Image (cartoon, coloured by chain):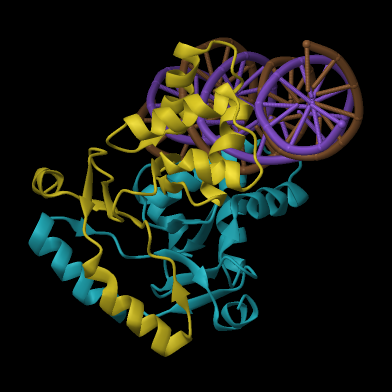
Chain colours: A cyan, B yellow, C brown, D purple
Amino acid sequence: MSCITTLKNKGLKLTPQRRLIVEAIHNADVHLTAEEIITLVQERMPGVHKSTIYRTLELLEGAGCVYKSELGDHFIYHHAEEGHHHHLVCTGCGMTIECEEDLFILVEKSLADRYGFRVNFKHLVMNGLCEECRNKSN
Amino acid sequence: MSCITTLKNKGLKLTPQRRLIVEAIHNADVHLTAEEIITLVQERMPGVHKSTIYRTLELLEGAGCVYKSELGDHFIYHHAEEGHHHHLVCTGCGMTIECEEDLFILVEKSLADRYGFRVNFKHLVMNGLCEECRNKSN
DNA sequence: ATTGTCATTGCACCTGGTCGCAATTATAAT
DNA sequence: ATTATAATTGCGACCAGGTGCAATGACAAT
């Protein structure tokens, strides 16, 4: 909800298109792909151009209202109020598992020490094989 | 070098196009983007179609001769004999740092224990801010 | 050296995502 | 309520990467 006020505070305009996009992301309980957002928005307001949606998504990301992550070959978006977590994506069956943040605290520290690099570990996507697929493939 | 024999052993044909592509990847000491490979190959043999190159790259990846990773918004390729490493990509200036594998051994183990998930940590790309950009932005 | 077969190529077209630009519109000031 | 103006939209063109298909060509068998 505060996305709207965040935008206003930054002197950005509140167009019907933007309202729809923000709404779509808020109503979703999981992350959406760009494609899904485009479909949802255009169902309610045909004629909205995809470039508008991509630009709004980028803007919302920049404003900190929305997180964008790469999930395989496409992008997913979800609103910022959700807790952080990481994704395990099985390359066998496509299933995704969400996993906790704490696993990476050590890595985060090591990277900072060794390379002076502050990693953005808000959302990380890792590919691999789930238990089931691993058993199947052997 | 053994890429060539690997292909032969699989009953695949050794076309001049494929020879050039394999050669380009072997001659490079760092990873190349698909774009760079296309340019290199076409310099020596104009008319080679990009789809041929993408397909060959995919084939080499499947044969285990070449690794493909996502680096931001594009793909990079390098031959399999290189050691594995991960990439730190600065979202500020675009600079990339290569970092060692050993950082992730612990994480790998935790994920297997907690979720039964075997992560493919061959090449991981992590976004964040490098030291310089972090100092600048404050 | 010729031939047959199947892998491979080039082509034309498609996809998701991005960009520059002219037309439109949300908002603030009057 | 009008107006000014800067942000935003829709459009069309573009980019990297991928795909189905008919034509070509590498290689094995003769």
Horizontal and vertical percent position of residue B132: 10, 44
Q: State which quarter of the image contains the C terminus of chain A.
A: bottom right
Instruction: Identify the residue at horizontal 49%, vertical 52% (top origin).
Output: B64
**Quick one: B36 or B130, which is closer to the camera?**
B36
- Residue extending farthest bottom: B113
Q: Is residue D14 left or right of residue B82?
A: right
Judge left or right: residue D24 versus residue B84. right
Figure quadrant of residue D4: top left
Left/right placement of residue A49 relative to residue A77 reads right
Q: Nearer the viewer, residue C26 or A127?
A: A127
Number of callouts in the render? 0
Q: Position of residue B54 (x, y in %)?
A: 57, 34
Q: Is residue A88 above or below residue B63?
A: below
Q: Quadrant of residue B7?
A: top right
- Asked whether the viewer can see residue B59, the reply is no
Which percent across, then down, holds residue B38? 49, 23
Q: Residue at x 43, y 63 (%)?
A: A2
Q: In front: A64, or B82? A: B82
The answer to whether residue A40 is seen in the rendering is: yes
Compare residues A49 and C16 and report the one nearer the observer.
Answer: C16
Q: Is residue A105 left or right of residue B46?
A: left
Residue B56, horizontal then vertical, whole percent:
58, 36
Q: Residue, x 53% and y 46% (percent of image)?
A: B6
**Location of residue B138 with respect to B21 vertically, above or below:** below
